[in-house]
């Protein structure tokens, strides 16, 4: 539902809550032919510059109000001038969601896989209700909320990772993956599920958005043989399989973690040479759960928001 410059009114904007970290800004929103709503305002904007208001209703029942503002840039948006000074290569995977060329990595939290048992239970409850009955709508709402928990957690994690990398680096080098082809070529059902759960395309979009918002660059390089190419001599290890987690070059004898070697190859293809090869991998804090814990013995994503990353 879209409202132009008329038909809506925002009033009674106030700050609620106690403590420095608990303050929220709320307001009363009036929509013509609908009524009043209490909304949480996430950003400050000028009411006179609002040209359109969009109302979005999710299947879970959550309502989002989007204010389209003309002629205004975010205050915290920074533009990067000149050539990039610091670059990082990022390799994505199933076991490790992201591995960086500086030696850091992020384990894959697998939110959908951890929530599958509860989703199956809710699907079974929904199938046993009489369609369009009150209990059927209640069960459908619970199922929609469960899917939204997984979606919100994944998006929040991706954007926080992007904000962390954009604050530290000027250039991000990614491999140009054909995600649909990877899923089609998946050997087992579990592997295809984990590829869906990893959401590589969504991760790439979130990282690109965070870097472009700050005026920084994201560079895609061909993904062909990034795992088999030696980052030192450039030769190809044809005998490397998916089960091999350590890369050993048969030509020069170079040995390194498989994902870290792929990150260095990405940087090399982009024209960058890392000053030093990391001796070992270290996790991005906080780990290991990232807010995913069991719920009632069934598993599930119990937090919509991933804990913030800490630099270091």
Image: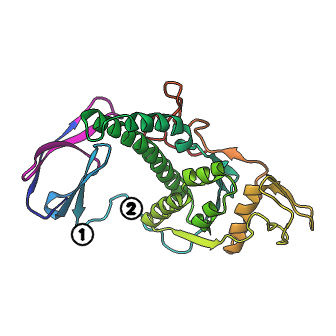
- 27 relative position to 64: left or right: left
Give the residue at the far top of this rendering: 296
Q: Residue at x 30, y 65 (%)?
A: 73
Question: Which image quarter is the N terminus in?
Answer: bottom left
Residue located at (82% from left, 55% from top): 256
Viewed as shown, does residue 217 lie left or right of 305?
right
Q: Which residue is mark 2?
A: 77
Residue 202 shows in the view: yes
The quarter of the rendered structure image containing the C terminus is top right
Q: Which residue is mark 1?
A: 71
Residue 243 point in image, percent of width and height:
79, 52
Q: Position of residue 116 (x, y in %)?
A: 52, 39
Asked if the stretch drawn in magenta spans residue 25, the answer is yes
Secondary structure category for the residue under label 2: loop
Is residue 237 in the magenta section?
no
Residue, x 48% and y 41% (percent of image)?
306
- Answer with left or right where residue 267 lies relative to residue 35: right
In which image quadrant can residue 140 be found?
top left
Please provide the residue range marked out in magenta. 16-42
Apparent side of residue 77 relative to residue 228 in the rendered image (left or right)? left
Q: Position of residue 113 (x, y in %)?
A: 56, 42
Q: In which image quadrant can residue 272 be found?
A: bottom right
How far is the residue under mark 1 from the one under mark 2? Answer: 14 Å
Identify the element where label 1 is drawn. Answer: loop
């Amino acid at each position: 539902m879209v409202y132009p410059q008329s038909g809506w009114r925002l009033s009674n904007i106030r700050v609620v809550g106690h403590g420095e970290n608990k303050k929220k800004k709320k307001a009363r929103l009036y929509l013509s032919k609908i009524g009043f709503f209490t909304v949480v305002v996430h950003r400050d904007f000028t009411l006179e510059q609002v040209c359109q208001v969009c109302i979005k209703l999710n299947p879970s029942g959550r309502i989002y109000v989007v204010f389209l503002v003309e002629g205004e840039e975010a205050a915290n948006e920074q533009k990067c001038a000149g050539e990039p000074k610091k670059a990082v290569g990022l390799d994505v995977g199933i076991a490790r969601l992201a591995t960086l060329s500086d030696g850091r990595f992020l384990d894959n939290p697998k939110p959908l896989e951890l929530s599958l048992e509860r989703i199956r239970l809710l699907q079974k409850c929904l199938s046993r209700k009489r369609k369009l009955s009150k209990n059927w709508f209640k069960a459908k709402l619970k199922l929609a909320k469960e899917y939204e928990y997984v979606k919100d957690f994944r998006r929040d994690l991706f954007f926080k990772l992007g904000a962390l990398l954009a604050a530290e680096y000027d250039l991000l080098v990614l491999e140009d993956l054909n995600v649909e082809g990877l899923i089609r070529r998946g050997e087992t059902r579990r592997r295809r599920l984990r590829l869906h759960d990893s959401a590589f395309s969504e991760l790439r979009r979130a990282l690109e958005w965070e870097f472009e918002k700050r005026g920084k660059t994201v560079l895609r390089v061909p993904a062909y043989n990034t795992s088999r190419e030696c980052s030192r001599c450039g030769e190809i290890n044809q005998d490397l399989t998916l089960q091999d987690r350590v890369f050993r070059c048969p030509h020069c004898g170079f040995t390194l973690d498989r994902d870290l070697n792929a990150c260095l190859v990405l940087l090399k293809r982009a024209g960058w040479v890392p000053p030093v090869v990391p001796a070992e991998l270290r996790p991005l804090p906080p780990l290991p759960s990232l807010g995913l814990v069991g719920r009632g013995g069934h598993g599930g994503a119990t937090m919509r928001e991933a804990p913030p990353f800490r630099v270091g």
